[in-house]
Amino acid sequence: MGRVVHFEVHVDDMERAKKFYGEVFDWKFEDWSEYAGMPYFGVVTGGDDELGINGALMQRQSAPPELNQAVNAYACTMGVEDYDAVEAKVLEGGGKVALPKYALPGMAWQGYYLDPEGNIFGLHQPDENAK
């Protein structure tokens, strides 16, 4: 099987991106720039005892995605315990709503946002009472 084991978020402003993801999701960063030959920070998204993967923030190598274009890459979705509280942090941190919160009936709350770098990501809160 080809299980996803790592992700990369392409960014223009590394410090702005680290601040956003650190404050919103409590991600931790490790400088791997020497290995990558460019600004590249490993991302630790949680403990080894938690479901999920780690990844990296890397320096964007071309123009950022255009607003309102179709998604032409993978969109990562973060599992959260309190959707509304995390959404407030996203917006306070400079993120914007791409697709407002909606119910996946009987399963979860879902929505999509743009980070300050123009990348799309999702929030997902399991809730069997969502409707």
Image: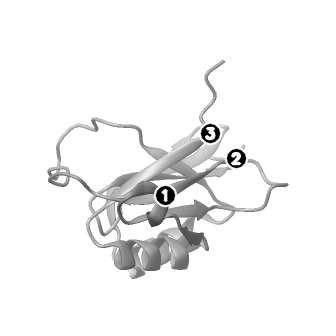
- Report if residue 102 is visible in the image: no
Q: Marks 2/3: CA distance?
A: 31 Å
Residue at which label 1 appears: 35
Q: Position of residue 25 (x, y in %)?
A: 58, 69
Left or right of residue 2, residue 62 in this image: left
Q: Which residue is mark 3?
A: 5
- Choose between 68 and 107: the one closer to the eye: 68
Image coordinates for residue 91, horizontal then vertical, percent: 39, 75
Specify the amino acid type for callout 3: Val
**Front position in the image: 101 or 61:** 61
Q: CA distance from mark 2 to mark 1?
A: 46 Å
Task: Provide the residue designation for mark 2.
Answer: 129
Q: Quadrant of residue 108?
A: top right
Q: In percent of the image, x 61 and y 22: which residue is there?
A: 2
Question: Residue 93, located in which quarter of the rendered image?
Answer: bottom left
**In the current view of this chain or complex, which residue is farthest to the right?**
49
Mark 1: which secondary structure?
helix
Q: Earlier in the sequence, mark 1 or mark 3?
A: 3
Are the residues at dot 1 and dot 3 in contact (C-beta closer than 8 Å)? no
Amino acid carrying label 1: it is: Tyr
First in sequence: mark 2 or mark 1? 1
Look at 50% across and 57% down and name the residue there.
56
